[in-house]
Image (cartoon, grey):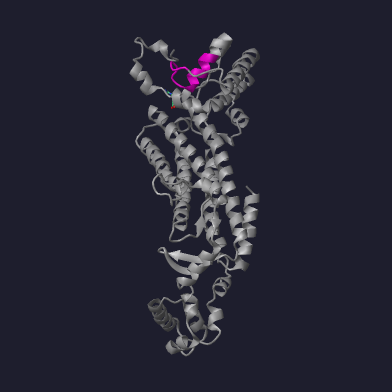
């Protein structure tokens, strides 16, 4: 059954139908579609465009359809082109004439624009909830590890000592920005396209402010052609999701490295790792690897929609129907990754001893040894050279700087004294870094308080 049968003389070819239809995937937002129709008919009645009786019949009919779809007693059948045609057909079948009045002053073009926005908005709210859950887990690890020393890396080479709290704090910042980015996207998309018709508005005296208000939008969109053809909010959302996926992937990569036999910084919980069918000793970080890998699908969705949108003339073109499956897949993927990843980090254990030993063995205190000399009047460039010589000396003997005797220190520079040991201890190295954003406990405590506040505001 076609909505547009009147103009056509031939039955649609089955292959054409299959290629053209979207019900198989846009059925996913039947709730949003029905909610939009309810607001539309409420407005139509307020404006005297349909009668109160018709409105009541339509609302009751739509509620019944919603309930039956929720309960699974009404099923989607293949002959309908999309969710909009399906709902209207079932409505008319159930309530008769009145059902045919629902689509007054509306096109599927503004209808689908509305549905997609409502759907994205609902999903943004859910994804923000998941990001918040992840941030809470990260903050917990930060609070518990203010003095868990570990090497900080650049080029994946041990650089300077930090704490686990500080390292986790970096991810807190990333995911906090992701949360904000989703909120920004939501704010910008939150204008109601309904009432834009096919492209040029309608001749009915619609109250678009009222419909926008009923549906929780900030207001109506201001150009009907833009309203039906705009999908840049989908691009923004997929951009935000790609960034989340990228952040998750970096974190996953670190977990994989830290869980390796060589590092042993963390131990994954059995529930989040898997064994090998042949090698009995294996405990593999599959979940982290999959989170890392699934990033590709999310990027793929972003590139797809950018490509779909790049060449289509105003206003609506069927190309735009391609916005859905890829968006749905990216949303599902990111939601899954966020949930699994949060579960994984909340159950993994940190080998604090191993982390601290690793920081000690990697000359992460070399900068502090040079700073010690600078504080005793040696120019930094000279200090850098002196400590470089000491590092080489240690490497040849498999020692740490802390293992050198005072005589060995003084053999390279007489400026060294007994307080050098205190000056290059892991604790001193970290605790002297007290500027905002640095790993010293004093600075970190303030940051943690600020992070708590940020979570409270979510
Ligand atoms: N299924 C369509 C979509 O997703 C709905 C709008 C159809 N409009 C049209 N003029 N064929 O974009």
- Quadrant of picture, ligand 1: top left
295 or 178: nearer the viewer: 295
Q: Decide which of 382, 211 is in the foreground and name it.
A: 382
Residue 444 figure quarter? bottom right
Q: x%, y% of residue 409? A: 46, 85
Task: Tell me where residue 329 sits by quadrant.
Answer: top left
Q: Is residue 196 visible?
A: no
Residue 217 seen in render: yes
* Residue range highlighted in magenta: 77-90
> Height in image: 75 above or below 430?
above
Which quadrant does the N terminus fall into? top left
Residue 387 on image: x %, y %: 43, 80
Return the residue nearer the eye: 365 or 127.
365
Counting from the top left corner in percent of width and height, residue 231 is at: 45, 36
In the rendered image, residue 72, in percent from the top left (x then y), is placed at: 56, 21
Q: Residue at x 36, y 32 (%)?
A: 313
């Amino acid at each position: 059954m076609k909505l547009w049968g009147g103009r056509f003389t031939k039955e649609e070819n089955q292959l054409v139908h299959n290629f053209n239809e979207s019900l198989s995937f846009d059925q996913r937002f039947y709730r949003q579609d029905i909610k939009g129709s309810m607001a539309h008919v409420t407005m139509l009645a307020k404006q005297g465009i349909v009668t109160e009786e018709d409105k009541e019949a339509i609302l009751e009919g739509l509620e019944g359809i919603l309930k039956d779809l929720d309960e699974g007693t009404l099923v989607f059948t293949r002959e309908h082109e999309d969710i909009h045609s399906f709902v209207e057909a079932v409505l008319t079948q159930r309530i008769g004439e009145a059902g045919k009045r629902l689509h007054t002053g509306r096109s599927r073009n503004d209808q689908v624009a509305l549905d997609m926005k409502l759907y994205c908005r609902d999903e943004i709210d859910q994804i923000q909830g998941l990001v918040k859950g992840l941030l809470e887990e990260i903050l917990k690890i930060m609070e518990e590890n203010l003095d868990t020393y570990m090497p900080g890396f650049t080029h994946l080479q041990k650089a300077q000592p930090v704490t686990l709290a500080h390292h986790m704090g970096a991810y807190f910042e990333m995911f906090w920005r992701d949360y904000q980015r989703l909120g920004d996207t939501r704010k910008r998309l939150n204008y109601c396209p309904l009432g834009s018709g096919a492209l040029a508005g309608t001749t009915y005296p619609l109250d678009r402010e009222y419909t926008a208000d009923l549906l929780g939008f900030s207001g109506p969109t201001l150009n009907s052609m833009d309203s039906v053809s705009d999908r840049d909010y989908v691009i923004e959302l997929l951009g935000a999701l790609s960034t989340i996926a990228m952040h998750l992937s970096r974190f996953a990569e670190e977990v994989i490295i830290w869980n390796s036999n060589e590092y042993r910084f963390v131990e994954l919980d059995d529930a989040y790792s898997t064994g090998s069918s042949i090698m009995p000793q294996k405990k593999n970080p599959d979940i982290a690897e999959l989170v890392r890998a699934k990033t590709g699908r999310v990027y793929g969705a972003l590139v797809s929609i950018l490509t779909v949108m790049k060449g289509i003339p105003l206003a609506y073109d069927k190309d735009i129907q391609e916005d859905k499956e890829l968006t749905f897949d990216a949303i599902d993927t990111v939601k899954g990754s966020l949930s699994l990843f949060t579960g994984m980090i909340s159950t993994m254990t940190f080998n604090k001893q191993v982390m601290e030993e690793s920081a000690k063995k990697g000359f992460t205190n070399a900068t502090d040894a040079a700073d010690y000399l600078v504080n005793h009047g040696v120019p930094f460039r000279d200090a850098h050279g002196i400590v470089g010589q000491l590092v080489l000396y240690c490497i040849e003997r498999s020692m740490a700087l802390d293992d050198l005797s005072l005589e060995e220190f003084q053999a390279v520079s007489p400026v060294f004294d007994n307080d050098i040991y205190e000056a290059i201890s892991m604790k001193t190295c970290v605790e002297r870094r007290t500027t905002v954003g640095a790993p010293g406990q004093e600075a970190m405590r303030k940051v943690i308080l600020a992070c708590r506040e940020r979570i409270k505001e979510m």
